[in-house]
Amino acid sequence: MRTTMQHLFMTLSVLCMAVPAFAQGAGASGNNLVPIAAGLGMALASGLCGLGQGRAVASSTEALARNPGARPGIFLFLVLGLAFIESLALFTFAIIIIKVK
């Protein structure tokens, strides 16, 4: 675990030091990294939302298996939680569409 954290922090420090390499001169026109950043941002948001939805469904099915009588309450909060998780991906998509244009 310790070496994993060390590798993570070393990678982050290298990325922070590499920022000046992407700086543009005064005569440069356009920014060709925006589509790449948009794609990575949407992939990250949708992937993490998928993981969150999977965990929510797994927890709700486990709760239903333990107490079938609590189905209405569990179902209500499951649907509400899934709607909030999905809205995060949709908000990310909307922000990316606005920034790319």
Image (cartoon, rainbow, N blue to C red):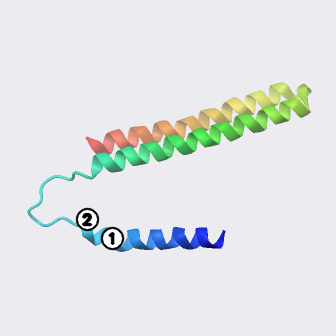
Q: Is residue 55 left or right of residue 24?
A: right
Residue on which the image places disc 2 = 22
Spot the residue most to the left.
Answer: 27
Comparing 60 with 13, the one in front is 13
- Tell me: residue 23, above or below residue 45: below
Q: Is residue 15 left or right of residue 7?
A: left
In percent of width and height, residue 43 lies at: 45, 43
Comparing 67 with 33, the one in front is 33
Judged from the image, the secondary structure of the residue bearing numbered disc 2 is helix
Spot the residue most to the front.
Answer: 3
**Amino acid beneath label 2:** Phe
**Quarter placement of the N terminus:** bottom right
Is there a contact, CB below 8 Å, between mark 1 and mark 2? yes
Question: Residue at image x 71%, y 34%?
Answer: 57
In percent of width and height, residue 38 lies at: 35, 46
Looking at the rendering, which quadrant does residue 25 occupy? Answer: bottom left
Question: Residue at image x 32%, y 41%?
Answer: 98
Q: Is residue 39 left or right of residue 57?
A: left
Q: Residues within 10 Å of mark 2 (few under 14, many from 20)?
A: few
Q: Is residue 11 left or right of residue 19?
A: right
**Quarter placement of the C terminus:** top left
Residue 18 has which mark?
Answer: 1
Q: How many marks?
A: 2
**Amino acid beneath label 1:** Ala
Looking at the rendering, which quadrant does residue 81 occupy? Answer: top right
Question: Residue at image x 89%, y 26%?
Answer: 68
In percent of width and height, residue 40 lies at: 40, 48
Judged from the image, the secondary structure of the residue bearing numbered disc 1 is loop
Question: Residue at image x 28%, y 50%?
Answer: 34
- Tell me: residue 85, above or below residue 4: above
- Tell me: residue 12, above or below residue 67: below
- Tell me: residue 77, above or below residue 12: above
